[in-house]
């Protein structure tokens, strides 16, 4: 019989803000998930190679110094897409971002994100619903998915892809006016 | 032959019709233009398209009007039956259109007219047509 604890879906939360890590850790823990946290994209990128997660919560702008915004979260999303092809399939990513311009949302979905949610309008029940959707998808697809370790060449490529959003190599993503309140209800 | 594709451009403004068609010059695409929802609907009833380029505001003089969005359910049905892909090309779309477009309707891309990059646009179109071919093949295989 399977251990009831290890059978619970595991979720990785990636955010450079300790406050958000703590909040999401307790919220998801109370909802019955096993939660792991990563304060940087490097830690997250390494964890994705050693464990399998039912869903990954990613902050889009992971910043090392608290000031610069390089949108390294997009690198992680690209990394997840790469792992899917290898195949070393992970669950889907849910982006949680302080930035919600059209271009940010577009870039996240084009890299396979399951959803894009804005931190300013964070809603616990909506968030947990979205996590459940992603976990359900993972449960239904993992049986079909073969898993294997990466070859050295694939490992190199994975590192390149996840790092391409480091300083100087990021795509142009400024924060335009339409980022102010993107979820405002239309009249 | 590679590069061929059938595109339906749903766009009310003459300048944008000309602009988008000219950006795709040199490809072997056949592009049909519909300037109204009615015409788009008629064409979708009688033809199969690889890609629909959809403007969200088809009565450009009406502020806050997103009548093009009303076609999304219909286009989603075309995707499921025929593999038809959708790229929204809009100047007025809002974040929620982008999110719902990708999440609920599985659009292939969302292009902001105010930041349209020709190369980005062409790549998006060729990717979408390739996806349409692939998805249509899978649909036919299941039948």
Image: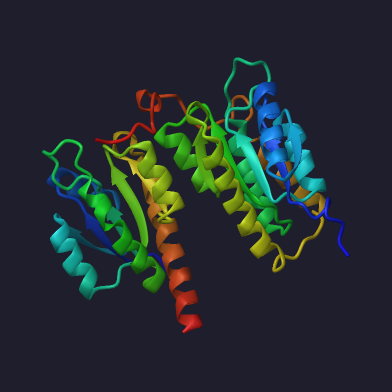
Q: Residue at x 39, y 33 (%)?
A: A183
Q: Residue at x 32, y 34 (%)?
A: A185
**Residue A16: x %, y % from top left:** 67, 25
Is B34 situated left or right of A48 in this image?
left
Seen as rendered, the residue at the extreme front is A30
Question: Is B106 above or below relative to A28?
Answer: below
Q: Residue at x 43, y 44 (%)?
A: B99
Q: Image quarter for residue A162?
A: top right
Asked if residue B129 shows in the view, the reply is yes
Of A134 and B127, nearer the camera is A134
Question: Is A183 above or below relative to A144?
Answer: above
Seen as rendered, the residue at the extreme left is B61
**Residue A29: x %, y % from top left:** 72, 39
**Residue A131: x %, y % from top left:** 60, 46
**Residue B106: x %, y % from top left:** 43, 56
Is B13 situated left or right of A184 in this image?
left
Asked if residue B26 shows in the view, the reply is no
Is B39 situated left or right of A49 in this image?
left
Position of the N terminus of chain B by quadrant: bottom left
Q: Residue at x 52, y 31 (%)?
A: A122
Is A63 situated left or right of A88 in this image?
left
Q: Image quarter for residue A7?
A: bottom right
Of A10 and A28, nearer the camera is A28
The image's colouring method is rainbow
Of A148 and B61, nearer the camera is B61
- The mark total stands at 0
């Amino acid at each position: 019989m399977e251990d009831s604890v290890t059978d619970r879906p595991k979720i990785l939360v990636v955010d450079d803000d300790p406050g958000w890590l703590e909040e999401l850790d307790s919220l998801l823990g109370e909802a019955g998930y096993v939660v792991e946290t990563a304060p940087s994209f490097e830690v997250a990128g390494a964890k994705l190679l050693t464990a399998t997660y039912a869903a990954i919560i990613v902050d889009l702008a992971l910043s090392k110094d608290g000031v610069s915004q390089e949108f390294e979260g997009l690198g992680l999303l690209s990394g997840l897409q790469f792992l899917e092809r290898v195949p070393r399939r992970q669950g889907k990513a849910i982006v949680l971002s302080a930035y919600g311009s059209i271009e940010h949302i577009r870039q996240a979905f084009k890299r396979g994100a399951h959803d894009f949610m804005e931190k300013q309008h964070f809603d616990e029940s909506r968030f947990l619903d979205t996590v459940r959707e992603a976990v359900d998808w993972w449960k239904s697809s993992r049986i079909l998915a073969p898993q294997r370790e990466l070859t050295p060449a694939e490992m190199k490529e994975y590192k390149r892809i996840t790092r391409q959003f480091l300083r100087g190599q990021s795509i142009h993503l400024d924060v335009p006016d339409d980022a102010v309140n993107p979820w405002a209800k239309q009249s | 032959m590679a590069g061929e594709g059938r595109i339906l451009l749903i766009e009310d403004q003459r300048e944008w019709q000309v602009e988008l068609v000219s950006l795709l010059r040199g490809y072997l695409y056949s592009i049909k233009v519909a300037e109204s929802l009615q015409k788009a609907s008629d064409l979708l009833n009688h033809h199969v398209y690889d890609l629909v380029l959809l403007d969200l505001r088809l009565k450009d003089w009406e502020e806050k009007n997103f009548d093009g969005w009303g076609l999304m359910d219909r286009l989603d049905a075309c995707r499921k039956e025929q593999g038809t892909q959708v790229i929204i090309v809009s100047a007025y779309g809002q974040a929620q259109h982008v999110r719902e477009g990708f999440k609920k309707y599985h659009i292939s891309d969302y292009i902001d007219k105010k930041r349209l990059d020709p190369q980005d646009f062409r790549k998006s179109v060729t990717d979408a047509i390739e996806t349409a071919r692939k998805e249509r093949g899978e649909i036919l295989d299941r039948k």
